Structures are given as structure tokens and as C-alpha cells.
Image (tube, rainbow, N blue to C red):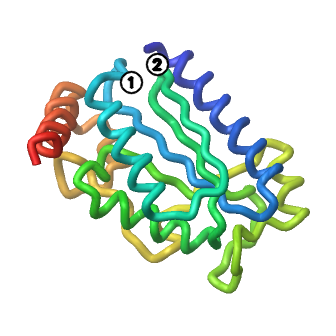
């Protein structure tokens, strides 16, 4: 997988997120991605993670709209749910933090970039002005910090994952071995 292919895939994913938010009628968008470290983004192990992630999302939310994409650049799924964005993010983080494969999946609550997101909102909370931001391609995932959680930890050490990714603290081989180990343990349980 080339960097160019991954970037094009990311652009297409953001475009689809924008389209879903525009048509979502106040629903919150959940985006599940599975992208293992290294150049190979689709494998038997990543599909095991994807299947488990989809099942966990379906069990945790009342899904109104669902779209699954099994791509060479990595699995991605979109779910429109009838829940406030911050509560959606809390549930998404609970899956990431407690599911045996949660460390290997990203589950984001996506909102228009200009959306006012607070706990007082009862539903997806996208206002007309928020949708105009989304129409311009400006969408964003809610962060763990917005719900009072620490950033995700690295698979191999106790540092924030983003720090290790940026500094390339660990080799791709080390990360892939840990990824495979987590999937193998899951499959044996």
C-alpha cells in the first residue's frame, strides 16, 4: 500500500462522512476503521478485528444506517446512530478500552467541524449551520479528551500512541507482532 493510496482512501472516507452527515437528519455518525501498522492494511487478522468491531458497534448502538467497506487500504464502516455525539463517543471509547480487540480498532464519533457539542444535546445535534460546515468538507472526530479521557496508549508501551507513532519509537515488525498476538489470543478464547 502506498502513501498516495492511503491518502486518497482517507479523502474518500472524509467525503463519505460529510455526505452521511448532510443526509443524517440529526443522527450522529460513528466511523469504525481497522488499519494495521505497516504497508498491508487488509489481512485475515484485520478482517477478524473488523468483524468484531462491527458486531460490537451493532450491540452497543441502535443503528439507523450502516455502510461497510472492505478495502485494500483498510476496513471502514459507517453507522448513523440516534444518540448525542458525546454519549456516542463515550460508548465508542468503552468498546475500544474493554473489547479484547478494541486496541486494534478506531471507533470515532464524527461531527461537523463547527458543531457545538455539549452534554445537553439530546440527539445527534447537527444544526443547519453545522451542516453547512460539513458541506464544505469540514468534519472532525470527537476526541477522548472531550469526554475527560486520556489519549490512547501505545500497543507496546505506556506512552500516548500518537507520540510513539510520530517518533517512530517502535518498529513496524514489533507492532505487527503485537497486533497478531492480540488477534491470536482473541481467536483462542
Question: Callout 1 environment at 10 Å: few (<14), some (14 to 19), or many (20+)?
Answer: some
> Which residue is under mark 1?
41
Q: Camera-side residue: 66 or 130?
A: 66
Quick one: SS at disc 1?
loop
Please state the total of marks drawn on the protein image.
Answer: 2
Which residue is pictured at 40% across the width and 72% down the height? 149
Quick one: SS at disc 2?
loop
- Picture coordinates of residue 177, whole percent (x, y): 14, 31
Label of residue 72 in the image: 2
Outermost residue to the bottom? 120
- Quadrant in which residue 109 is drawn: bottom right
Which residue is pictured at 66% across the width and 30% down the height? 11
C-beta proximity under 8 Å, tags 2 and 1: yes
- Quadrant in which residue 188 is drawn: top left
**Quadrant where the N terminus lies?**
top left
Can see residue 110?
A: no
| Measured Cα–Cα span from mark 2 to mark 1 | 6 Å
Which residue is pictured at 66% across the width and 61% down the height? 28
- Picture coordinates of residue 108, whole percent (x, y): 52, 54
- Picture coordinates of residue 66, whole percent (x, y): 61, 45
- Picture coordinates of residue 122, whole percent (x, y): 69, 80
| 28 relative position to 96: left or right | right
Amino acid at each position: 500500500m502506498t502513501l498516495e493510496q492511503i491518502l486518497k482512501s482517507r479523502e474518500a472516507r472524509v467525503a463519505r462522512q460529510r455526505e452521511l452527515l448532510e443526509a443524517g437528519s440529526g443522527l450522529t455518525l460513528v466511523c469504525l476503521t481497522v488499519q494495521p501498522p505497516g504497508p498491508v492494511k487488509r489481512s485475515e487478522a484485520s478482517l477478524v478485528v473488523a468483524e468484531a468491531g462491527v458486531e460490537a458497534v451493532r450491540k452497543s448502538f441502535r443503528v439507523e444506517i450502516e455502510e461497510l467497506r472492505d478495502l485494500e487500504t483498510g476496513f471502514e464502516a459507517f453507522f448513523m446512530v440516534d444518540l448525542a455525539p458525546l454519549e456516542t463517543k463515550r460508548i465508542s471509547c468503552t468498546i475500544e478500552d474493554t473489547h479484547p480487540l478494541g486496541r486494534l480498532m478506531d471507533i470515532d464519533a464524527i461531527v461537523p467541524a463547527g458543531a457545538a457539542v455539549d452534554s445537553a444535546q439530546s440527539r445527534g445535534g447537527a444544526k443547519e449551520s453545522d451542516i453547512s460546515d460539513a458541506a464544505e468538507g469540514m468534519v472532525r472526530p470527537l476526541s477522548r479528551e472531550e469526554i475527560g479521557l486520556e489519549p490512547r496508549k501505545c500497543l507496546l508501551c505506556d506512552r500516548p500512541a500518537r507520540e510513539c507513532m510520530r517518533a517512530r519509537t517502535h518498529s513496524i515488525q514489533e507492532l505487527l507482532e503485537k497486533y497478531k498476538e492480540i488477534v491470536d489470543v482473541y481467536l483462542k478464547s
